[in-house]
Amino acid sequence: MAYDLAVIGAGPAGLTAGIYAARSGLSTFILERATTGGLANEAWLIENYPGFDSIEGMELMDQMKKHALKYVSILPAEVKKIEIDKNMTLYTNNNSYKSDAVILATGSLHKKLGIPGEAEFIGKGVSYCAACDGFFFKEKKVLVVGGGNTAATEAIYLQDIGCDVTLVHRRDQLRAEKSLEKRLIKSGVKIIWNSVLEEIRGKNLVNSVLIHDLREDVSYELDFDGVFVLIGDSPNNTLASAVDVKLDGQGYIITDKKQRTNLHGVYAAGDVTGGVRQIVVACAEGAIAALSAYEDLSI
Amino acid sequence: MAYDLAVIGAGPAGLTAGIYAARSGLSTFILERATTGGLANEAWLIENYPGFDSIEGMELMDQMKKHALKYVSILPAEVKKIEIDKNMTLYTNNNSYKSDAVILATGSLHKKLGIPGEAEFIGKGVSYCAACDGFFFKEKKVLVVGGGNTAATEAIYLQDIGCDVTLVHRRDQLRAEKSLEKRLIKSGVKIIWNSVLEEIRGKNLVNSVLIHDLREDVSYELDFDGVFVLIGDSPNNTLASAVDVKLDGQGYIITDKKQRTNLHGVYAAGDVTGGVRQIVVACAEGAIAALSAYEDLSI
């Protein structure tokens, strides 16, 4: 069977693309290699998605998933390769799917620090998601690395659930929203300014870290049970770059205002296109991509 | 008092801009000349705003309003004039406000047909909003003019609440989403293809219309009690054009990807910028405009 449209990725962008495409009459399906909801699942609290003044990331994504499932199927499979001929063929491990158009909503991944001990202690004290793993560090000392909204929000969360939280940031002020910064300081989170994490140490589990003070140019060791690395994300662009979809300098897919890429029939939406990485923006891009596909296929 | 940012318009774009700006630490307020929620209020049912699989327009806008009011004030006043000097001065009838930046989220207005009888019978059988006025036409014959999503959705609504509905459209197919077209036909709405409304007639109230068949080039009279004109919208660009904000050929404000206009410190978001006129897109543009203002003011 050939579909009108395949959507790769079931985060906010992909789910919204599915809703809009199906409502426009396109035969559509969504392929997701991991969890429906994408990185948005990991936000413990979302307070800026209009209409929900405060909702857990998982809960919001669950509602979007149910919303999408009214119109479209979500298949659990990883697309390994896209072949573009007259139409598209998407290869997963066990199957192939044909469609006239494809929307890449493949999202982004957490950035790594790339320091000694980081890879070694993943799941043994190193985490990229406070909402997922914070619970295990109750009444323990945790270090949060980062200075953006995510780092600030999750530091507050960790403090709230009973961790003893310190945040380390390479500059002398945060990049986070001012309201978050205020709440961060009010919450009792300690902040180490102008410093970077140099090494994560332990035996079976993390028990200390090496911090480098950039101003004094000295390193010193501090005891911690957990390290949360919250320094941003990098785009999942492997599928895109394999078919020569144009990327920008940081690896994000370049689209026009209608979410079209440089390839006919290939659209992109959400975090993989960079820009402001907000759920409502990913949703909007998914909607626009689907409507553009509908427009182009209807001609 | 001088604010960092003024938002003009409290529809989806303006409310979201308010949320994002205030959360970013900007001192912000919203000015609204009419009803909070804008045109979105008039949608009787919204099924494509991600996270709400089915919600009345007024209910969704009420939730967004409450959400925004957690962070920002909404003042009921019409901005008559903007003066741009070192910063902005906004003049209403009784007041003036100073701010460093302004987001134009002034929305759009319903398009008129401009035919004899239309202006004469507004509120006497001619309406631009089925959700507002449909109730008055229960068990009566109504004509819906238009072929887009709004026309189709509202025609179904009118039929559902017990009106006897006919839709007239100038082409031989609708512009509406296919799923809506199917539901429209299933609902029992009669459709007059390839025809336009030429005149609305009556005494004190509408009682008939003149329809012109474009293929046969003949006009004929039909009895109707109500006429719903649902042919689209035009941008509220008066404030923008008065300060030489650049508009496109159809009068929509031109912005870059960050919602900046050609004027420093002036941003635009939502329906007044044209494009895909969807609530989630207006919200996204409001968020981006606010974050851009924050970025520019923080430098």
Image (tube, coloured by chain):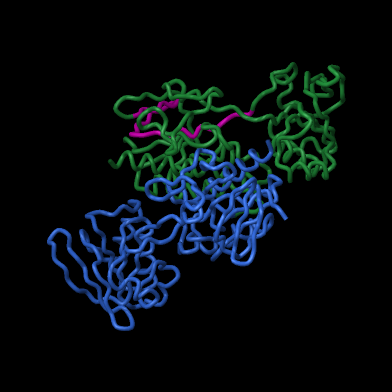
Chain colours: A blue, B green
Q: Left or right: A75 with respect to B97?
A: right
Q: Left or right: B125 with respect to A82?
A: right
Instruction: Please state which of residues B79 and B295 is positioned toward the viewer in this rendering.
Output: B295
- The residue segment tinted magenta is B88-110
Quarter of the image with the N terminus of chain A in it: bottom right
Main SS, magenta residues: strand
Residue A22: % across, % down: 68, 50
Residue B299: % across, % down: 28, 41
Residue B75: % across, % down: 46, 37
Q: What residue occupies the far front of the structure in this picture?
A: A85
Which residue corresponds to the image point at 59% horizontal and 27% vertical from the top-left? Answer: B234
Q: What residue occupies the far bottom of the structure in this picture?
A: A204
Which corner quadrant of the image does residue B114 belong to? top right
Residue A280 within the magenta-colored segment of the rendering: no
Which corner quadrant of the image does residue B51 belong to? bottom right
Which residue corresponds to the image point at 48% horizontal and 31% vertical from the top-left? Answer: B77
Q: How many marks?
A: 0
Which residue corresponds to the image point at 66% horizontal and 54% vertical from the top-left? Answer: A98
Q: Left or right: B27 with respect to B272?
A: left
Quarter of the image with the C terminus of chain A in it: top right
Residue B191 at least partly seen: yes
Instruction: Please state which of residues B124 and A120 is positioned toward the viewer in this rendering.
Output: A120
Residue B229: % across, % down: 72, 29
Residue B47 at least partly seen: no
Q: Say above or below: A209 vs B138.
A: below
